[in-house]
């Protein structure tokens, strides 16, 4: 088999637009089709979810405010069902809360309306390029195993019931095992934002994570480095 040039591969990808506003949906459909994508449109959340389950989409463009089921519910359902199709959220306002909520629920990126079509196109291409790289991501540290695609974490073969945020935190620490990560750095990476002085949120989440990952086991893996931050590593006890 011959490798296809990047653009050629992306050009025939299948996109699903879930957007209730007729004008926006038509505009996106036209623009994306002209750019070589195969595009389906759903005008309700529940219809979109049906299509997402039935069709083999490379990417979903999901509006938040929708009739039937809203974008949050659609996204949560997809991820709960193990669907890792990249999702680009369209939000009506730049609310930090919405942004965090979307990313926590497993959105891959988001755009605030109104947006330039060129920006949408750039974001789509970026997501599609990095899409296949997510297929086989397993991280092991000591007896912890993280499946980054299925969002599954186990320790000693036992399933850890983590919230999406706890999973993100653990996967960051695990991917950079042995490296001391500052609270600010963790806040930026896990919450995708700068908390400035309000990094207490990191401590709170680390505490909750420890209660699940470390407390039930004799060997502790998450360590506090006073005045600096946290590190996940196997240390001789
Ligand atoms: Ca809408």
Image (spheres, grey):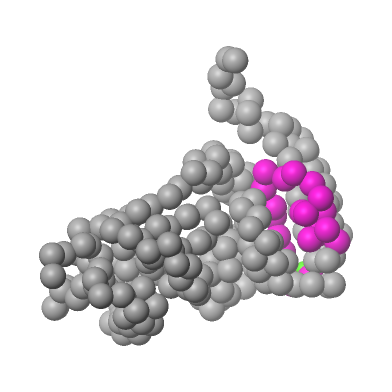
- The image quadrant where one finds ligand 1 is bottom right
Residue 44 percent across, percent down from the top left:
84, 65
Residue interval drawn in magenta: 47-66
The answer, for residue 199, to whether it is visible in the render is: yes
Magenta-drawn stretch contains 50: yes
The answer, for residue 202, to whether it is visible in the render is: no
Residue 33 percent across, percent down from the top left:
78, 38
Is 129 positioned to the left or the right of 11 in the image?
Answer: left
Residue 227 percent across, percent down from the top left:
14, 78
Magenta-drawn stretch contains 112: no
- Whether 195 is drawn above or below 129: the answer is below
Is 220 positioned to the left or the right of 212 in the image?
Answer: left
- Whether 1 is drawn above or below 196: the answer is above
The answer to which of 82 and 31 lies nearer the viewer is: 82
- Residue at image point 55% right, 40% down: 132
- Whether 84 is drawn above or below 226: the answer is above
- Whether 129 is drawn above or below 191: the answer is above
Direction top: furthest residue:
2
Is 177 positioned to the left or the right of 77 in the image?
Answer: left
- Residue at image point 28% right, 58% down: 142
Residue 195 percent across, percent down from the top left:
35, 77
Looking at the rendered image, the quarter that the C terminus falls into is bottom left
The answer to which of 32 and 106 lies nearer the viewer is: 106
The answer to which of 182 and 116 lies nearer the viewer is: 182
Residue 209 occupies quadrant: bottom left
- Residue at image point 84% right, 72% down: 68
């Amino acid at each position: 088999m011959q490798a296809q040039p990047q653009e050629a591969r992306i050009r025939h990808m299948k996109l699903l637009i879930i957007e209730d506003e007729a004008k926006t949906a038509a505009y996106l459909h036209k623009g994306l089709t002209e750019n070589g994508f195969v595009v389906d449109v759903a005008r309700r959340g529940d219809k979109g979810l049906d299509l997402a389950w039935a069709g083999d989409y490379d990417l979903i463009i999901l509006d938040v405010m929708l009739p039937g089921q809203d974008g949050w519910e659609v996204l949560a359902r997809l991820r709960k069902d193990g669907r890792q199709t990249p999702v680009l959220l369209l939000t009506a306002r730049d609310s930090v809360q919405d942004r965090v909520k979307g990313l926590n629920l497993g959105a891959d990126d988001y755009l605030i309306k109104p947006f330039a079509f060129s920006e949408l196109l750039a974001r789509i291409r970026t997501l599609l390029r990095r899409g296949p790289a997510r297929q086989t991501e397993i991280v092991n540290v000591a007896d912890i195993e993280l499946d980054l695609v299925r969002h599954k974490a186990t320790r000693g073969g036992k399933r850890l019931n983590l919230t999406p945020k706890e999973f993100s935190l653990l996967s960051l620490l695990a991917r950079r095992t042995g490296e001391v990560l500052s609270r600010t750095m963790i806040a930026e990476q896990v919450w995708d934002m700068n908390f400035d002085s309000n990094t207490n949120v990191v401590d709170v989440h680390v505490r909750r994570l420890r209660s699940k990952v470390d407390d039930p086991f004799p060997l502790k893996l998450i360590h506090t480095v006073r005045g600096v931050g946290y590190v996940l590593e196997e240390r001789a006890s």
